[in-house]
Amino acid sequence: MIFFVTATLSICTYLASTALIVRGFARSRYRSTALLLAWLGVASHTAYTVQTMLQNTGFSFSFFSTASLISMIVALLLLLATIKKPVEKLGIAVFPIAALMLGLAYNFDGTTQRLANESWAMSSHVLSSIIAFSLLNIAALQAVLLAVQDQQLKSHPPKRFIQSLPSLQAMESLLFQMLTAGLFFLTLSLLSGFFFIDDLFAQHLVHKTVLSLLAWVIFSALLLGRSLYGWRGRTAMRWTVSGFGLLLLAYFGSKLVLKLILHR
């Protein structure tokens, strides 16, 4: 019963926060209420995740449970970012996805695997992978929003949603902050992965490793290009989305094929 209550509370508050954000494009008085509901959604989501781990003495690394955990971390990181920057508009995409992933995890939870039983390298790999994906997820959403904002600002007049966003400079600054942090954890993930993976072919991880390395190269090249050549704007947006697309295939494409289609 407690699982149903916490999951339902989280889903409802996520959706209510999204509704208020949509309604409050030009009304700042809705912002505090929307953020409060989002914090409650993340807290309830966290409580549900902890409760399932305690009951099952481990975390389920099934497709939907992992997606639920990542969406929860993405929502938390977004809320932390709103403390300094008014970027809560990203919640229009983040919060409904978190609600959906939690609902799927509640109904289709898989078998558990205790992280504590794994080696320190395996534990570091899993945790750094989840954090890296979460940070780069926000960066990709930020890049898409930047592309829309850049296009809309060239029209006269831009739509109300675009007018309610922070300046392009502020949005771009947050994008590269997320990219830098995400690349750091992605590097940790790749390094720790090489420590614990004994047989890439036996564990069906070759494609995941290759795609992750390609994503790492793209993100590294983008940050280097910004530092040396001042890359920004559409170049940054395209590279960010391309890198995250590879990472999405690496993290979830392989898991989707192996678990849901091939049943391995």
Image (cartoon, grey):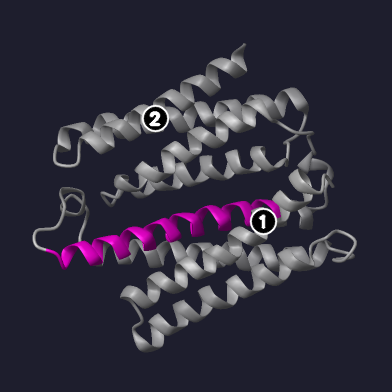
| Most foreground residue, 116 or 69 | 69
Magenta run includes residue 4: no
Front: mark 1 or 2: 1
Under mark 2, the amino acid is Leu
Name the side, left or right, on which 238 lies relative to 128: left
Say which label, 1 or 2, has the lower sequence index: 2
| Most foreground residue, 187 or 261 | 261
Name the side, left or right, on which 24 lies relative to 230: left
> Residue at horizontal 53%, vertical 43%?
71
- Magenta segment range? 126-155
Relative to 249, is 74 above or below? above
Quick check: can you spot residue 83?
no
x, y (%) of residue 8?
51, 20
Look at the numbered discs 1 and 2 and tell me whether their residues touch, using CB distance below 8 Å. Answer: no
Under mark 1, the amino acid is Gly
x, y (%) of residue 223?
45, 77
Please give the label number shown on residue 15.
2
> Residue at horizontal 46%, vertical 66%?
241
Image quarter in which the N terminus is found: top right
Relative to 234, is 131 above or below? above
**Residue identifier under label 1:** 253
When asked about the image quadrant of residue 128, the answer is bottom right
Magenta run includes residue 144: yes
> Residue at horizontal 42%, vertical 72%?
238
Q: CA distance from mark 1 to mark 2?
A: 27 Å
> Residue at horizontal 60%, vertical 14%?
2
Q: Counting other residues with Cα less than 10 Å from the Cα at mark 1, is it few (<14), some (14-19), or many (20 or more)?
A: some
The residue at the far left in this view is 157
Circle 1 — which element? helix
When asked about the image quadrant of residue 92, the answer is top left
Circle 2 — which element? helix
x, y (%) of residue 181?
49, 63
